[in-house]
Amino acid sequence: MFVKPNGWTSVSNAPLDLIAANLRRERDRTGMSLSEVAKKAGIAKSTLSQLESGAGNPSVETLWALGVALGVPFSRLVEPAVPRVQVIRAGEGPVIHSERAHYSATLLAACRPGTKHDIYWLALEPGGARESEPHVPGSVEHMIVASGRCLAGLAEDPIELGPGDYIVYPGDLPHICKALEPGTTAMMVMEHTV
């Protein structure tokens, strides 16, 4: 569910409408039908139809799967039009929560056309691990832990990290992120080809 401290909480607000418009735009760009995209993403056609109508409540996992199916980075599905100068204060920005772990991601910046980086602020709490399926081929994730401790990296061999630690790993292979302490936060930069 999307949460923005200063107001976005209902289905009718901007984030879901924005995701709906971006999904329709990207599906139209590919020329794929609802059925084709839903099948590639491993979701029900009715779920995709609801999302394209601005209904539903997409999880991180659903949006990542749709991005992979459409051949675009996650950010292209959630990014709003960006003004020339943009400030995102701590605790603001569109937040997307995982349905499988105590994990939320806030997109801070999306890549401009021709660039290849998206920047996220991660807020993690102990519990289940955020297990990510491979993203778009060529994806690489960079992460710097700001507070707390976590396990992150490739699913087969995650590394324990603490404040100030940096890790880089292939985002196009299965990977995880799991908080080991309450209040764990990190900055993640996703590098991808366009």
Image (cartoon, rainbow, N blue to C red):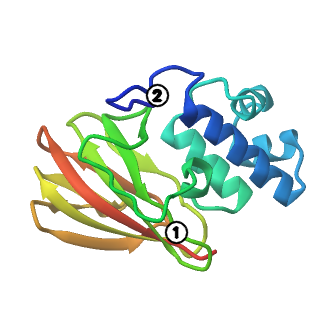
Amino acid under disc 2: Met
Location of residue 33 by image quarter? top right
> Closer to the camera, 83 or 8?
83
Query: Which label sits on residue 61?
Result: none
**Which quadrant of the figure contains the C terminus?**
bottom right
Location of residue 157 by image quarter? bottom left
Query: Which label sits on residue 111?
Result: 1
Report helix, strand or loop for mark 1.
loop
* Left or right: where 176 falls relative to 139: left
Compared with 90, 118 (above or below) is: below
Query: Which label sits on residue 1?
Result: 2
Residue 84 is situated, as x and y percent measured from the top left of the image, at 47, 65
Location of residue 163 by image quarter? bottom left
Amino acid under disc 1: Cys
Residue at x 52% of width, y 67% of height: 172
* Left or right: where 105 falls relative to 114: left
Residue 171 is situated, as x and y percent measured from the top left of the image, at 47, 66
Report if residue 108 is visible in the image: yes
